Image (spheres, helix red, strand yellow):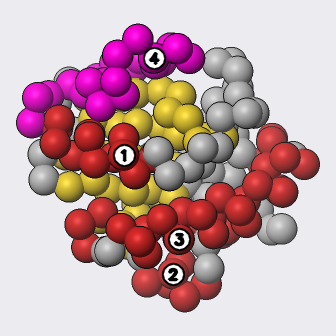
Amino acid sequence: MATHERPPDDLKRPLHTYVCNAKHDEYAKVCERFLGNFSNLKVWRVQYPDSKVYTCWYAGFNYSFNYEEERYLLNFEIRPKNIKIEFRHPEFLPKNTYDALKNNLDWKTLLFTEYPEKYLKELVSVYLNTVKSVFDSNREKFHRWHPKIFKN
């Protein structure tokens, strides 16, 4: 079983402190810095699995949420030696990237340390820019926990 926490809008402590295991601290700081590149993203929920093997940050557009409306676009699974980035709506990834990434449920994933950070910033930017217009016009396509596969 896992527990969840919603970081407050006025973070009273740094985002990287929202972890369930001190071993996640190094990559939580890396993830916090990486997320700083995207002013339109916010971590809306943090998951702490009982096993404490990883901490998961669920992120979505910062302008479009209230806490009853959970529309996540990315997950950041923070582990002691890496971060797994999960694209919850992979149909918005470029085709060549989509085909190259690993599957996890209906999502596509990659490991942070396997790519240059500059490439990851560009990929996440392209993904967010592509998904934005569809997201803004129909948030129901982005339902709560799992992506809904649909045609644009």
- Rounded to the nearest angstrom, the CA distance separating label 3 from label 1 is 15 Å
Disc on the earlier residue, 1 or 4: 4
Crowding at mark 2 (Cα within 10 Å: few <14, some 14-19, many 20+): few
- Rounded to the nearest angstrom, the CA distance separating label 2 from label 3 is 12 Å
Q: Which residue is mark 3?
A: 122
**What x and y, as percent, mark residue 131?**
72, 59
- Rounded to the nearest angstrom, the CA distance separating label 4 from label 2 is 34 Å
Closer to us: 149 or 113:
113
- Rounded to the nearest angstrom, the CA distance separating label 1 from label 4 is 15 Å
| Residue 145 in sight here | no
Residue visible at 44% across and 56% down in the picture: 86
Q: Which residue is mark 1?
A: 33
Disc on the earlier residue, 4 or 3: 4
Please, what is the three-letter code of the amino acid marked with disc 3? Glu
| Residue 89 in sight here | yes
The picture quadrant where one finds residue 60 is top right
Please, what is the three-letter code of the amino acid marked with disc 4? Leu
Stretch of the chain drawn in magenta? 1-23
Secondary structure beneath dot 2 equals helix
Left or right? Give the position of 140 relative to 149.
Answer: right
**What x and y, as percent, mark residue 121?**
48, 65
Number of residue marks: 4
Q: Which residue is mark 2?
A: 97
